[in-house]
Image (cartoon, grey):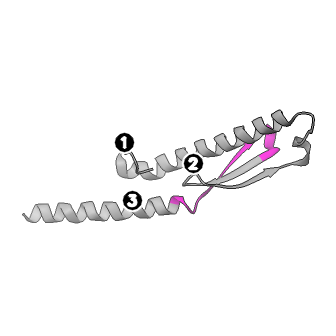
Amino acid sequence: MNNMNQMMKQVKKMQEQMLKAQEELGTKTIEGTSGGGVVTVQVNGHKKLLSIAIKPEAVDPDDVEMLQDLVLTAVNDALTKADDLANNDMGKFTGGMKIPGLF
């Protein structure tokens, strides 16, 4: 019975550490770019888009499609990096397993 109580304490401690790590992801900022830096976006570790910066040379009224592609590429770059960050930060608790709904 003593081993069970000790195990439950360890599980509770690990859960608290996981929650703290998950909360900390929201405070981390990840940057994605495209077009050699003409479009830059920032997301947090929870994949919330925080900002989009577009340099004037990226804006061509005759080629709006190119700007759309640059923004899309930069956002996807940032989101991929956010996934990598979450997997890295939370992976130490899950042993690399993806747990649905965790991150």
| 21 displayed left or right of 85 | left
Indicate whether 20 appears above or below 42.
below
Residue holding disc 1 = 97
- Residue denoted by label 2: 82
Q: Would you say residue 22 sits in the magenta stretch? A: no
Query: Exactly how many numbered labels are in the figure?
Result: 3
Label 3 and label 2: CA atoms lie apart by: 17 Å
Instruction: Please identify the quarter of the rendering in which residue 46 is found.
Output: bottom right
Q: Which residue is rendered at x = 30% and y = 65% of the image?
A: 13
SS of the residue at dot 1? Answer: loop
Q: Quadrant of residue 63?
A: top right
For the N terminus, the image quarter is bottom left
Q: CA distance from mark 3 to mark 1?
A: 14 Å
| Marks 3 and 1, the one that precedes in the sequence | 3
- Give above or below for 54 relative to 66: below
Query: In the rendering, which numbered label is found on residue 18?
Result: 3
**Residue 51 place in picture, x, y as percent:** 72, 56
Q: Are marks 2 and 1 in contact (CB under 8 Å)?
A: no
Residue 86 location in percent, x, y?
50, 50
Residue type at tag 2: Ala
For label 1, count other residues whose C-alpha is less than 10 Å away and answer few (under 14), some (14-19) or many (20+): few
In which image quadrant can residue 17 be found?
bottom left
**Helix, strand or loop under label 2:** helix
Q: Position of residue 27 (x, y in %)?
A: 57, 63
The one of 68 and 43 positioned closer to us in this rendering: 68
The boundaries of the magenta stretch are 25-39
User: Residue at 43% of width from left, 52% of height from top?
Assistant: 90
Element at label 3? helix
Image coordinates for residue 61, horizontal then vertical, percent: 92, 39
Say what amino acid the circle numbered 1 marks.
Met
